[in-house]
Amino acid sequence: MKTQRASWLYLPLLLMAAFYILPMYIMLSTGFKSFAEVSLKTMWNLPTGIHLENFQRAYEALAPNLWNSVRLVVPAAIISSILGSLNGFVLAKWKFRGADLIFPLILFGMFIPYQSILIPLVEFMKRINLYGGIWGLVLTHVIYGIPITTLTFRNYYAGIPVELVEASRIDGAGILGVYWHIMLPLSIPSFVVVLIWQFTAAWNDFLFAVVLTKPASWPVTVALNNLAGSQIIEWNVQMAGSFLAALPTLLVYIFLGRYFLRGLLAGAVKG
Amino acid sequence: MRKSKFWPMVVVLLLAMALLSACATPAAAPAGDAAAGDEGTAAEAAGDSANQVEVFSWWTGGGEAAGLEAMIGVFNAEYPDIEFINAAVAGGAGTNARAVLATRLQAGDAPDSWQGHAGQELIGTYVAADQLEPVNFLFEENGWLDVMPETLIPLISQNGNIYSVPVNIHRANVLWYNPGILADNGLEAPTDLDSWFAAMDALQAAGVEAPLAMGEQWTAMHLFETVLLSSLGPDAYDAVWSGEGDWAGEDVTAALENFAKTLSYTNSDASALTWQDASRLVVDGDAAFNVMGDWAEGYFREIGMAPQEDYGWTPVPGSNGNFQFLSDSFVLPVGAPHRDAAIAWLTVAGSQAGQDAFNPVKGSIPARSDGDRSLYGEYLLSAMDDWASDRVVGSLTHGVVANDAWKSEIDTALGLFLTNSDVAAFQDALVNACAAAGPCQ
Amino acid sequence: MSLSRDRLISIALVSPSILAVLVFVYGFIFWSVRVSMSNWVGLLPDYSWAGLANYRNLMHDPRFHIDVRNTVIFTVLFVAGCLALGLILAVLLDQGLRGETFFRNLFLFPMAISFIVTGVVWRWLMNPAQGSRISGLNLLFDKMGLDFLINQWYTTPYWGIGFIAIPAIWQMSGYTMALYLGGLRSIPDEVREAARVDGASEWQLYRYVILPLLSPITLTAMIILGHISLKVFDLIVAVAGKQLPLDVPAIYMWTTTFDGGFYNRGAAIGILLLLSVAVLVIPYLRYTLRTEAEL
């Protein structure tokens, strides 16, 4: 009975799977085609041969920028996670007067339309001498990541029983001790979620990158955008490049997706 | 059990991240020893060494990028001790690039030189904000006034000051056609608006559903400016841009009605097509005509089409004898970080060698009249002849006749017109745009 | 003694973040508000006072009217689409089928990719050409004999913006699915058993027992999706370019500021966007904080 019902359920699942996979199919199959084969009218055809040189050419064009992206994303994700964790801890378990006001104030930062603050942002970065390089961009991602990381950690910590904190304090632990020995080990699932989230956000960002960095520090999204010229676009190379640019985040989701989900559930489902 | 799998994975992840960031630091260090790294903050520090020039443009691909590279080659040969930093940003017909440039200028971080369309785009935006130095001295020292057309100079000047060095000239008012389709239907290339409309009526009757190919919104503005020129004639056309003409006039109404009629021959999926897609419809035989700047010719050649066989050209009907131009040019910002290097770049950009390196590759004609004719193909030679003999008028879409604010208001009015086809409302909006942001204040 | 030291430490721990947010969020918002009440047009900053004139002008701006209409259509379709699809997928995956992990990852992966990467693909897929130039999904439908599905996509008059929701749903429905799946997993089996014992059918079980239990998740998802959709920008530009029928406030803000130099108008649009997000978010924040306090 159960198995019978299960088997027809695969039909909608497979249909939906096709919908989700379709754009990736186009991207990859175009990436393998020769330039002559690329045409809108034959976009569904499989490539007649495997033209790996597209990927090689795209890699050559994007390699320095891929590396810039790594140098950007790793510190950005780690620092904003740590900050979010500290904020979440204090705002959930060590509230001082006004903490309940501070949380929504921080959270609201998530909602500003970034396009509207580019000018003061660039001006500020210029003034503190961080304009043009990777570190200014890191700082930007860290700061605009604070709301979401704080939210995630605060929700997670709020679900941890107060008794744990109390017991530890009776044992003589101070605020840092409680954080280090109790909260931090418990919040690894949240760290995974937040790290992945921030990794993806910073990796995919174009807007901040294009206005805050100069050519030597461009991350991959800016370089990918530049790869498309304005007259003849070699779509096969462009698609190969797109795939390369998406690969790191894809791998993260494929290999860590389940932990991401698990952490997401742990944070979202409390209460 | 759940945890037993989970923890090792987390450890691996954290280790990987630690490793990556550890790798990242030494990678930055060696490059940075001398001048604190390859980062932008360092670029500023290094900037004081005065042997580099950062040039900003939106030429990142295709013939444009190749042309820029060719000109950089000339520059490197003449100034081997100046490092050229190519800060080109692509996207959105230069709109990403312009946003980046705007934020940089706001923050007081001008590049040493940047690309802009000659004319009001530069004058109305940057000169008005005192961001540009006049470059008359370059024109005088290098004798450019003798080799650049007299008609061009006023269009790139204000109060006698020249504000940019034009590298190339493109023509906007070109009608591209498919010679085969015209021949099959016994048609000649049209010479005025009426014969053009008649030809398109005939084609529609013969089953060509959309004889005129058009693309996304800016290509509609491009079509608009050419039909406006054809309808008004050059004097009245110049007048509406200078503020002497009347946007509310009956001749403008007639021009807008002509434009509306032109639109009725276009393809319904225009908004989904890039200019390349739209031009391609002509050579593929899906449409008979396309109005596009002469960069389309470079595109046709790149996709292997032959002039006169696969595509023909004529001035947009009714605009014969007029050369509606646009020009890419480079500027000298006030307070350029490396002023001498920027002047060196501008000297190359205005030189015969620089322009003859850039233009054949980009598919445009040199702004100088002494280009080496052996380097240019059939179409470009005909454009050089017309440029020398025709009356020169400026393009709207490409920054010659209207400043940015005015143009963007016209763009909004045009976008509304494309959705509602209301000629009277369009004309009202044009009157308001001129009053709000143009010279009719 | 120790307590007050801990208090100081706790404040010290959050103060860098608070300071950063004060400058980068509230400082910049304040700057925008100021610019939105100025006459700043062109490259040179001009802070002369204009009061609410820029806002008043927007109220009479036909382009802004189109923007608001498009945002409403887009938001409704996008949020509803993500919720519906996410819920269906979550329920399907909750049936304990084999290959669950595979499907789950598959539905989640679009979240990992930006529209810088997939925008062009979607432009190809939603190519509106028909007849001899047919391509994209239209071509696929044609080949599969599903001609009734062939359409003009985002070039459809008036409703074109609705089709732009398709790639957006593609990207974010996996996230909604994950949230719902978490919700479903957290419902104790006893609840389901109890309902079944009471004679509820599967449909009734979901409709009357499970769905209500998921409503906090629906609310959270609506807020997150809603603010994404109010700010939608790069997706539309990547798929359809900048064209008035598909204009939204974020695009208007960008073009009027950087193409036109109307810094005052751009800032006013930005502030209006922020206010509309606030209308959405602040009641939600109050609600969640209050329900938390009750717990």
Image (cartoon, coloured by chain):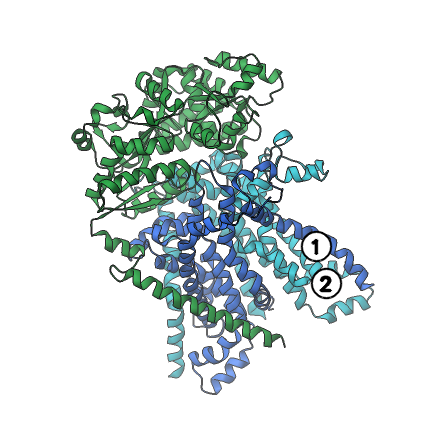
Chain colours: A blue, B green, C cyan
Q: Are marks 1 and 2 in contact (CB under 8 Å)?
A: yes
User: Badge 1: few (under 14), some or many (20 or more) residues near its Cα, within 10 Å?
Assistant: some
Disc 1 chain ID? A
Viewer-closest of B357 and C153: B357
When asked about the image quadrant of residue B115, the answer is top left
Residue C202, compared with residue B202, is above or below; it is: below
Viewer-closest of A151 and C174: C174
Q: Residue B189 location, x and y as percent?
A: 49, 15
Mark 2 = which residue?
Answer: C97
Marks 1 and 2 share the same chain: no
When asked about the image quadrant of residue B19, the answer is bottom left
Mark 1 = which residue?
Answer: A13
Determine whether, in the image, residue B260 is placed left or right of residue B26: right
When asked about the image quadrant of residue C55, the answer is top left
Viewer-closest of B176 and C17: B176
Viewer-closest of B191 and C249: B191
Disc 1/disc 2 C-alpha distance (Å) = 10 Å
**Amino acid bearing label 1:** Leu
Task: Kindly state the secondary structure of the residue where label 2 is placed.
Answer: loop
Q: Quadrant of the C terminus of chain A?
A: bottom right
Q: Residue at 60%, 50% (x, y): give it.
A: C170
Q: Is residue C76 visible?
A: no
Disc 2 chain ID? C
Residue A126, compared with residue A191, is above or below; it is: above
Q: Residue at 59%, 67% (x, y): give it.
A: A262
Task: Kindly state the secondary structure of the residue where label 1 is placed.
Answer: helix
Tell me the number on the disc at residue C220.
none
Q: Residue B93 location, x and y as percent?
A: 42, 37
Q: Residue A36 location, x and y as percent?
A: 53, 38
Q: Residue C288 location, x and y as percent?
A: 56, 63
